[in-house]
Amino acid sequence: MTFGMENSLSEQLYSINNLQQEYIQHRLKRIDLNTQQARTLNYIFSNSGTIQKELAIYLGKQDATITNLLKTLEKKHYITREIPENNERQKKLYLTDKGITAVQEIQAIFIELEEALSSLLTKSEQATTKQLLKKIQQHFPK
């Protein structure tokens, strides 16, 4: 007996993840952002005045990568980097008005996705699906 991978749970989860990523990337492209830039703006929105090191930990990226990412966002006028008087080595990160508008657009993408997915299932199916996915997440093999 052979195991059909195309019908396996892991393959279906992988496929859904890919569909979700394509959906998000396509919509972010419309507002001239990529996934890393969007995650960065969202993080700064939630953690105004954060420093680069905290952002690097959140994104799981090297400092050099974060520096380039921030330079790009600064050039596009989404963020500002300010040097506090008490510590000239650590620049604090803030969103500009354009950055705040971009975060609102990013959040709208996720709301739209949630509404689209929710419309596919009844309330009962949604509850069951969330419960099952939470169970998988909590007991995922290490």
Image (cartoon, grey):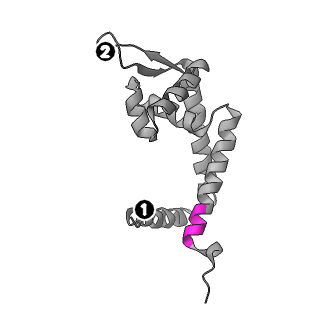
Q: Quadrant of residue 99?
A: top right
Q: Where does the image place residue 38, in percent across and percent down from the top left?
A: 56, 35
From this view, report whether residue 43 is shown above or below residue 100.
below
Q: Where does the image place residue 135, in percent across and percent down from the top left?
A: 41, 66
Q: Which residue is mark 2?
A: 87
Q: Quadrant of residue 34?
A: top right
- Residue 10 within the magenta-colored segment of the rendering: yes
1 or 2: mark nearer the eye: 2
Magenta residues: mostly which secondary structure? helix
Mark 2 packing: few (<14 Cα in 10 Å), some, or many (20+)?
few
Amino acid type, callout 2: Asn
From this view, report whether residue 70 is shown above or below residue 8.
above
Q: Quadrant of residue 105?
A: top right
Residue 17: mark in rendering: none
From this view, report whether residue 138 is shown above or below residue 106.
below
From this view, report whether residue 124 is shown above or below residue 85.
below
Residues in magenta? 9-14
Q: Is residue 98 left or right of residue 43?
A: right
What's the CA distance linking mark 1 and mark 2?
41 Å
Residue in the foreground of this view, choosing between 40 and 72:
72
Q: Which is more N-terminal, label 2 or label 1?
A: 2
Q: Which residue is mark 1?
A: 137
